[in-house]
Amino acid sequence: MLLIVRPGSEMLTPAALLALGAAALYATFQILTRKLAGENLMVLMMYPSLVGCVLLSVAMPFVRFDAGYPITDVIAFVGLGITGALGHLLFVQAFQRASASAIAPFTYMQLVWSTLAGWLLFATFPDGWTLSGIVVIAGSGVVLTWYERVSLPQSEPAAVD
């Protein structure tokens, strides 16, 4: 991860601290989703919405609103909400059907997708360090998955009478 981020003095900005806080909260969200994977799906979909609603309601007095928003922005925000909810739904479903160790390598695909989106949407082609970091992280996930599958004890087939 450090190959991709390459922390330095520029990481001590308020924006970087906000990103660090977002990463910590997202990690907490993933851990809680794993722990609660056996709960009812609708309950798991409601909790993040409820927490988000409460936290954002507390923040409302400190937010400045402009007079109007372009329809393209409104459509983009609605799309973000829908894709976020769908992503969370799929994440919960994955943890209900498989172990965390089997799912973890797939969560690293967000690095690939965010890098691809940055390149296509913002014309920020990743440099060699970023690409190297992605290869190391993705490769580690693949090797870990392979190692866990090889090291699991093989069950004996049931005898047929």
Image: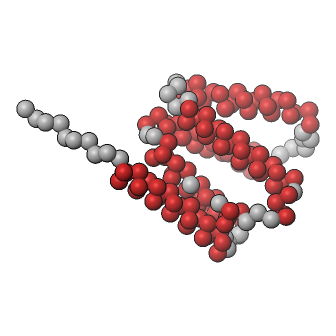
Q: Position of residue 24 (x, y in %)?
A: 71, 44
Q: Quadrant of residue 129?
A: bottom right
Q: Could you tell whether 142 is left or right of 77 in the image?
A: left
Q: Could you tell whether 31 is left or right of 146 in the image?
A: right
Residue 132 in the image: above or below residue 58: below
Q: Position of residue 120 (x, y in %)?
A: 65, 66
The residue located at (51%, 60%) in the rendering is 140
Color scheme of the displayed model: secondary structure
Q: Residue furthest left?
A: 161
Residue 44 in the image: above or below residue 71: above
Q: Quadrant of residue 133?
A: bottom right
From the viewer's side, name the closer residue of 58 and 106.
106
The residue located at (56%, 29%) in the rendering is 36
Residue 62 is at least partly visible in this image: yes
Q: How many marks?
A: 0
**Quadrant in which the C terminus appears:** top left
Q: Position of residue 115 (x, y in %)?
A: 64, 63
The residue located at (13%, 36%) in the rendering is 159
